[in-house]
Amino acid sequence: MQPTPVLQRAIRRLALTTKQGPHNYYKGNRTGAMGQHTKYGGYRIDWKKVRTYVCPDLSAFNLTPFVAARIEARRDRFAHTESGGPMDGKDYLRRWKEEGGTI
């Protein structure tokens, strides 16, 4: 069964997928090789090909959040427990037993 001629032309224009190509076709993710395989099954990294990103000096840069100043702080936080923080596992089990929880 084959697609119609109109559909065949449309399929030719689309990107090739791994299911449409030959049995050993690997599409990859455009990262490129950063080394080469050895004949013993290992991989040797070529450090000239490894990407390095240089971050500019941000010591004098004041970062601000992407939140407007008129937004109020949230007040729907967890109720503080005996431990002083959000409910942890021990607090949950204690409260569950107090409210009549059974196994």
Image: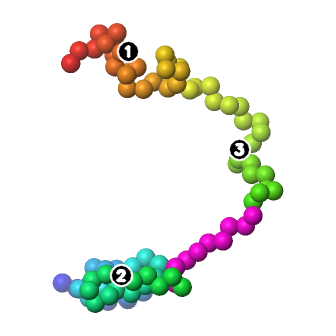
Would you say residue 80 is visible in this rendering?
yes
Q: Which residues are magenta?
A: 49-57
Residue hosting label 2: 43
Amino acid marked by disc 2: Tyr
Most frequent secondary structure within the magenta stretch: loop
Distance from disc 3 to disc 1, alpha carbons, whole Å, reads: 36 Å
Amino acid marked by disc 3: Val
Distance from disc 1 to disc 2, alpha carbons, whole Å, reads: 55 Å
Residue hosting label 1: 95
> Is the C-beta separation of discs 3 and 1 under 8 Å?
no
Question: Which of the 4 image quarters holds residue 68?
Answer: top right
Amino acid marked by disc 1: Arg
Q: Secondary structure at mark 2?
A: strand
Residue count near mark 2 (Cα–Cα under 10 Å), binned few <14, some 14–19, many ≥20: few
Residue 27 in the image: state x and y as whole percent: 37, 81
Please report whichever mark, 2 or 3, sits nearer to the chain's N-terminal start.
2
Q: Quadrant of the C terminus?
A: top left
Distance from disc 2 to disc 3, alpha carbons, whole Å, reads: 46 Å
Q: Which mark is residue 67?
A: 3
Would you say residue 14 is visible in this rendering?
no
Nearest-to-viewer mark from 2 and 3: 2
